[in-house]
Amino acid sequence: MQLLNQLFIVFSVLVLFVSSENNEHTNNWAVLVCTSRFWFNYRHMANTLSMYRTVKRLGIPDSQIILMLSDDVSCNSRNLYPGAVFNNMDHSLDLYGESVEVDYRGYEVTVNNFIRLLTDRWDEDQPKNKRLLTDENSNIFIYMTGHGGEDFLKFQDAEEIASQDIADAFQQMHEKKRYNEIFFMIDTCQANTMYSKFYSPNILAMGSSELDESSYSHHSDVEIGIAIIDRFTFYALEYLEKIKEKNSNLSIQDLFDYLTFERVHSHAGMRTDLYGKNVSQALITDFFGSVQEFLPDTAVVDLENSKTVLDLAVEQYNEAPNPEEYLAKTKFVNAKSAINRNMQVGQDQLLLSDEQSIKKYFVAFFILLSTLFFSTLVKRVPEA
Amino acid sequence: MALLEKIVRRAVQSGILSKAIANLPKLSKLCTIIGVLWLFAYLPMEGNYRNTYISENALMPNQAYSYFRETEWNNVRGFRTELNKLEHKPAKERNEVVYHWLEDYGLKPAIYEHETYGSTLYAVLNAQRGDGTEAMVLTAPWFNGDGYFNTGALAVSVGLLRFFSTWPVWSKNIILVIPENPGVPLRSWVEAYHTSLPLTAGTIESAVVLDYTGMSDYFDYIDVEYAGLNGVLPNLDLVNTAVHVIEHEGMKVTINGMKNYMANDFEAKAQNVLLGIEKMAIAGLNNIKGHESFSGWRIQALTLKARGIEGPFDITTFGRVPEATFRSVNNMLEKFHQSFFFYLLLSPKWFVSIASYLPAAVLLSVSFALSALDAVFKSGLLNGNDGSKESILALVVCGLCTAFSFLLSMLSHVGSLHPQVFLVAQVSIVFSSGWVFSPSIKMYHCLKAAAFLYFSIVLTSLLVVHFALAFVIGILAFPMTLVSSQGSKLKNNLLLVISNPFIATFAVTSLLRDQFRWEIFDRMIFAWESLGCWTWHIVCIGWYAPWLVVALSNNVQALSSKNDEASKEKKNV
């Protein structure tokens, strides 16, 4: 019993540690892609712009939203409402009305650019606002819509992206520590095939329709003369509209439960096996909202006066009677320029890394202790 | 290959081949019969045709609500009253009045003058936000194909253009054309548009011709005609769009002037096929409805005709059809390239594509090829007899006949033909050919072989581009394959008379009209000269030349009946 108790304690500490680390996203990003071109695909543009509006409403800033729109229906000469895009025939909401920042437009929306965006492989000229500047603490919401089929999604009527391509891109992102969690949402025909190839951890995926199943549009606007939104996106948005505040407790599971066959007219699917935790604990705001609340870190009491290695080095350098000699002695060859350049940044980094490394030592220590403990116990048992 | 050889050997052993050769004339007849049955019995059967569908995603017919209704009533009525006053005014005055209306609505009107065909008024509505490289044409002739004043259509057209000018949705320019009639004046305008007109509005993608005569507020249903000249059909997507739009408005729709618009049975389907073939085959030889005038410029065109005056549909409903069709075509991003360009409609909603109907014409052409083969076997050329003299002579005669028919087709342009004299001349050729030429039996068969082969080639090359014409002349010319050296002279002569291209054309077109059409030859020549319709030349060079060869060779048995009998005896031995 004693053994069991001790094991339990050790185990629960480990579990606590792991799970607490998983929740630690510090920033939110959204990649919203409309892959189809042409006026008759108005609804795909409307889908994407609706999602754009929703993530913005829930707090992701424009700088952290990558919006890819392969056509400009708002300015199409066939549009009865020039400069406006609607997702509902009541025209109560102009999706294009206020500041819309399209990062990739028209022919810039290509498979190549999309993969480069995810994996951040650009040449040095790529502007920052067109890059996905995520890190290991980023939660990313990826939404795609267009015309798809089994394991592919058409881009621009010219090329296709395969499900394996996206899966590989995600794996690269994982290896490069470019995300904490990804929520992948796709609204195309046979959409569920698009996430079937994923193999990287911490990815949650949702699609609008099964293999050999079409996704349907929700309704047509008789004035614009076109179908203006797809069913899956329409009901997803309808549910997301329920989230009025940022500390909502609605989960992705709740969202999925809302997308029934009666509503969507196709079998929406969700892939949770890579996600690793219960989907009912994954909050919608983990992906659609932005981290807004900051808790003061009480561990560091006085940031101004706390001294780091670098501070000490600078102090010693300044106080040394003969600074050049001091440098030669301590082998801080480029310290001076480094100090001047990185004074502020360096401080923060050092502080952060100190804190993290302490945590890591703490864990390692625990694991070591428990294994030791365990092994000694195991040795003793047969003797008893 | 071994298997193939085995099969061939078996076939030779069983004597199938020789039996088939002996029965070639029967096989030829069989081919023709199957060909005809294919079209009028097999295709209309359940399962052999398909439902029409909109193939081009961009079209989206009726996704937009049509607004040409109550608010436009008074406009249309006003225009109609004013237009009705113009009926007996000279063309210049009529055009001037409408010119000023269109100018007032912000359109760019212009008048195209042609020294013989009079003036044609047209106006361009530039797409406000479009790139101006493409256009859609709306046509309302002053007088329709049958010569009636086209009041309703004109009022609707002017009303529509006024209405269109208030919409900001156009990506293509819209052109309103008001020719004197939908025939040559319109054709010459289309030609001028592509060659010399100063005011143009880009490539014309589609054209809709309106036909609504009289002052009636109401009509019963709409008839769609689409068969262009020289076998050209509009893309099926456009026809489907129009049909879709009309049915969406709750109206009945017919095609090619089908009388019994409620029927849906086998008979109706077969009748629709027959009507479609008829309209295609004689396009240009009858009154032009309007859409024919656009043939040959890659413009998808059709004519909408309002039928009846009882109702329940009012004249603005007639306007909503072009409105919705135009909005649909306006959605297009490319040219019409989906769907089918070669098809037969069995009803407004059922069609067969070229792959299904082509075998009918192929069988006809095979039938002539078999007859040619039969003649080759009978000539004995393959039995080692030296026939080089005969075959060369046959080719010379063939060449001469072709040259003669070519000259005939060209000469006829010089002066107008006297049809009665011309037809009598044709009959006299049949009965008097013996005095001119009387070939030997070998020669006779060589000539027939050459003639039928010639005709078979004509049919084969024609059947894809102008299926209906190939099919019809194939059937009409078929009796000449029945001419045989064994048959009685009278029978042979009669077969030749009925398969004479001019006599047959005259008879058939007269039957269709229920009156003698003496003017048919002038009409064919006129259609070639002013509309560019090939029919006259195909009839002359493609059909008359081989017929002439057969007619010339016809007088063999009178001179060589003894030889014939001798050869018969030989065969029996």
Image (tube, coloured by chain):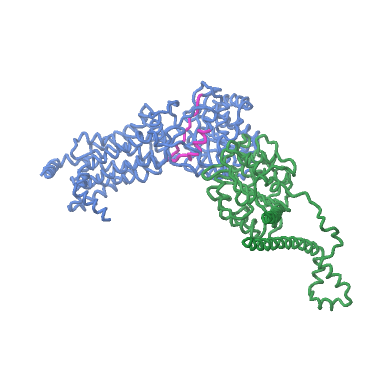
Chain colours: A green, B blue
Does the rendering let one see residue B43?
Answer: yes
Position of residue A202 in the picture relative to residue A26 (left or right): left
| Of residues A345 and A375, the one drawn nearer to the viewer in this rendering | A375
Considering every residue shown, the one lying at the far left of the view is B573
> Is A82 one of the magenta-colored residues?
no
* Depth order, front residue of A1/A45: A1
Q: Which range is magenta? A: B220-244
Q: x, y (%) of residue A238?
A: 66, 38
Find out whether residue B236 is within the magenta segment. yes
For residue B196, say whether it is visible: no
Which part of the image, by quadrant, shows the N terminus of chain A?
bottom right
Q: Position of residue B452 (x, y in %)?
A: 28, 44
The residue closer to the viewer here, A359 or B355, is A359
What residue do we see at 26% from left, 45% from top? B372
- The residue lying at 56 percent from left, 55 percent from top is A164
Instruction: Say whether residue B512 is left or right of residue B387.
Output: right
Residue B60 vertical placement versus A125 (above, below): above
Which residue is pictured at 52% across the width and 34% down the height?
A: B242
Relative to A275, is A347 above or below? Answer: below
> Foreground residue, B250 or B274?
B250
Q: Is residue B462 left or right of residue B21?
A: right
Give residue A258's quadrant in the image: top right
Q: Residue furthest top?
A: B310
